[in-house]
Each structure stands twice: as C-alpha cells, then as structure tokens.
Amino acid sequence: MAKRLPSAPPNLPGFSYVRALGSGGFADVFLYEQNMPRRQVAVKVLLSEVVTPEIRAMFQAEANLMAQLSSHPAVLTVYQASVASDGRPYLVMELCAPTLNQRYRADPLSVAEALSIGVKIAGALETAHRAGVLHRDVKPSNILTTVYGHPVLSDFGIAATVGDVQATGSVGMSIPWSAPEVLTDDTTGTVASEVWALGATVYSLIAGRSPFEVPGTDNSSAQLMSRIQRAKPEQIGRDDVPARLEAVLSRAMSKKPEARQASALEFARDLQSVETELGFTATPADIAVDGWVAAPEVDDDDRTRIKGVVTVSSAQQRRRRRRAETGSDRTAVRETGEPQTAVPAPRNLRAAGWLIAACVVLGAAFIVTLSVVLTHVAQPSAIPLVRNVEGRVIGDSVEFSWHDPGLSTGDQYQVSVDGGEPSLQRGTTFTIDHPDRRVCLTVTVNRSGHTGESSTPTCVDPVGAS
C-alpha cells in the first residue's frame, strides 16, 4: 500500500513553512519557523477529511490537556493551538526527533538507558493520572527526544480521541502495545492498561521488538492479538538483562489488570529497584507536588478523562518524604517543589533565642491568618441541590438527565452509579451503555472540592434486564 503524501501546509500568521516532517492516519506534521520569538517548531495539522464540529471541539479539549501537562520535563511542550484559515485545527509544539522509534529495532537500547527512559516516562504518566488524564497510546513512536537528548511523551490522547470518533469502533489502538482488555473492547483505557503499555514499551526498547513478536514466524495483527490474550511475552534474550527486570516487565504485562503494578509510580519504583541492583544511579521520577496539578476543565465529550481518580494525600506524601530523609525509603522518586535554602546557625545563644522568638511570633500570626482564610474557603455557601433526575431507556443504553440548579463558574457535577466511585462533568446528561441490570444514579454539585447534598437516587431497569 503506497504511503500517503502530506497534505498542503496551511498558511499560519507569524510562521514560515519550511518542509514536511511526517504523515499519520489523522494528521500531518510540518516544520515551521516562528517569526517571534524566532525558533523552529513542529506543527501538527489535522487532515481536512477528518475534521467535523465534534472533532474540532475534542481537538481543542485535548490541546488544553496537553498544554496543562507540558510543563512536565518528560512531556512534549505545546506552545499554542488554533484553527487555520482553511478550517484545520493545528498544534504548535517543541521540535523533537523520533530517534527512539527509528533506533530501537536496529540497535536496541542498553539496559541502563531503557530503565532511565522508563522511569522518566512513568513520572509523566503518574502526573497525568493524578490530573485525571489518560494518554491511551503509550508506545515507542510516541516517545520523542529533545535537542538535549531528554525523552518526552507526545500525543496525549489526541490521536486516540480522533480514532474513537471514526467508524473504527475503537480507540485508534496500536496493537503490539495494547493491553488485552483494550483489544477486546472491555475498556478504552485505564491506569492499568497504561501500565501495561509502558511495560511493553520498555520491553521493546531493550528487545528491539514488541513483546509478543516471535522472530521468523507470522507476526500479523491477528497472531499478535492472540498471543497478547495469552499474556505470555517472549523472553528478551539478552545476557545483560537480569531476571528481576524480566519479572518487573512480565508483571506489568499480566493478563489480569489487578495483578499489574497499581500505578505508573509503582512501576517506576520497580524499575528504580532494578537500577539499584545493577549498580546504576536511580533515575528520579518527576511528580508534581500536591495542589500544582489540578484536573483541567475540559469539554463533556472528552474521552481521555479517568473516572474517579484516587490521588495520593498530602499526609502520604509527607510520610514518603520523611522516609526519604531518614533513609528508610529506598526509592529515588523526586517530588519537585521549591528548593530549600540552608540558614546559617546564629553566632551565640542570645541571637538564637531572639531568632526563635521572632519565628514563633511570625508563625503564630501566619497560622491565625491562614486559619481565617481556610475557614472562609472551607465553608462554601449555598451549594445547590440537583433535583428531579430523570432516567430513560434509549435503545441499548440508559440516559439520565437533570436541570441545572444554578452552577457557578468552576462548579461541576459529581455523578455516582450504584454508589460507586464518582466522576466529574459539566453536562446535565449521563449515559450508561449496554447495562445488564438495574442502574441507580445520584448527582451532587462539587464546588472547589466540597460537595453539597446528593440528589435522591434515580433507578432505571434496562430493556431485557432481569
């Protein structure tokens, strides 16, 4: 099948076209020179034949998500996003090279380099997951290299979302790095499936092939899918790969999601333990501190959102930091924050006493002020109550709807099905596809992390349910 030629580059104000960089199923990537500030950038442009009003809205939501995360050192930087004069949405991004994807099959990476890349990308995924965002297409070709040689994760959900809207019936999956439950359409993505994909990616970088390829045999899509369902990857087959690393990657690619590492951070810790055993310096996994990464507000149609994300509490992070300071935490997970400055000791006890007294006074004043502010913030007034939630059967689905009780800017609906983990949204409808039993839904208004009174549960019996 002949390779598609790139589409015509759009005319972008403030940018000068240089040349085409690559073509994909849904977009082209071009090299432009930005006029001010002057620099070369990569511009990803959706193809005109896939652009619909829904695609345009979803592309904008995904661009916002990627921009929110691009401050992470292992996430590709997005400079801006807009729509060209010909109607095609585009992203202006940091110019990087796909060197890993070009290199690993011909020249597999060293164990040390692959472990380092795995930890860094795991840090990027953990940060995304804490922000409530799924990538859904982790694979070697989506790990680019900056001009300084740093690995960065690209395409946060953009290609996956476009694929979801097309008539393929699934999320633009990459079979060799897709978890079994994704291939069987049991889910379009979870934290567990992302751990699977990252484990398969690290495996590929070391082995020079995807985990379920068997050299010299039929490696068609059908055969790969059959082997992935059995979840028994081939041995890497390198003398410098320790059994401990094989076990870590095998666990990440377990058939049962609950048997895998529970998070990208846990996967990073396993890789760090292998680094330590091999005598390498443990690679830090950059994780944003509490309060820095807030779940960005996105459109209701965004499909990379994680339902009911469980985040690590401040108390847990403080315990981790204390363990790290006392040497009881053997991992090298780095939580980026403000640097601490050492204060020289006072010259005499009298000066020390005055200094301590001043600190106590200032600290007390700060605590009083902070408590007043927190008391004011922690008591949001008049959180509205959602009333009269209605449910109805539409074909094979059940749709719930309700009227806006008067949300303020920043408010969201917290929706819970059968008392399970809640999800957040702005829209006033919620659809459950193909339920096989009675389903009950409650809706609560979430304001700045505080919730009001829940609605009365509304239950619907789907057609054909017993």
Image (spheres, rainbow, N blue to C red):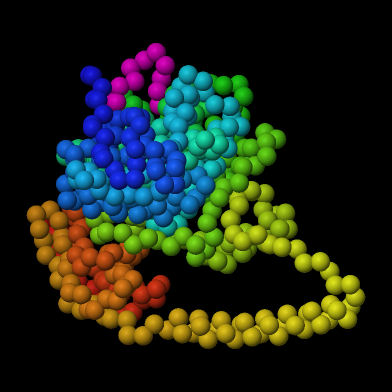
Rendering coords of residue 419 (x, y %): 31, 67
Give the quadrant of the N terminus: top left
Magenta region's main secondary structure? loop
Q: Residue at x 10, y 58 (%)?
A: 394
Q: Residue at x 32, y 85 (%)?
A: 382
Nearest to the observer: residue 143 or residue 398: 143
Q: Is residue 87 above or below residue 6?
A: below
Rendering coords of residue 209 (x, y %): 44, 24
Nearest to the observer: residue 242 or residue 256: 242
Determine whether, in the image, residue 291 is placed left or right of residue 11: right
Q: Residue at x 34, y 29 (%)?
A: 19
Rendering coords of residue 397 (x, y %): 15, 56
Give the quadrant of the C terminus: bottom left
Write the start and end of the magenta stretch as one range: 211-222
Residue 236 appears in view: no
Determine whether, in the image, residue 372 is placed left or right of residue 445: right
Residue 321 appears in view: yes
> Magenta stretch containing residue 217, yes or no?
yes
Q: Is residue 408 above or below residue 267?
A: below
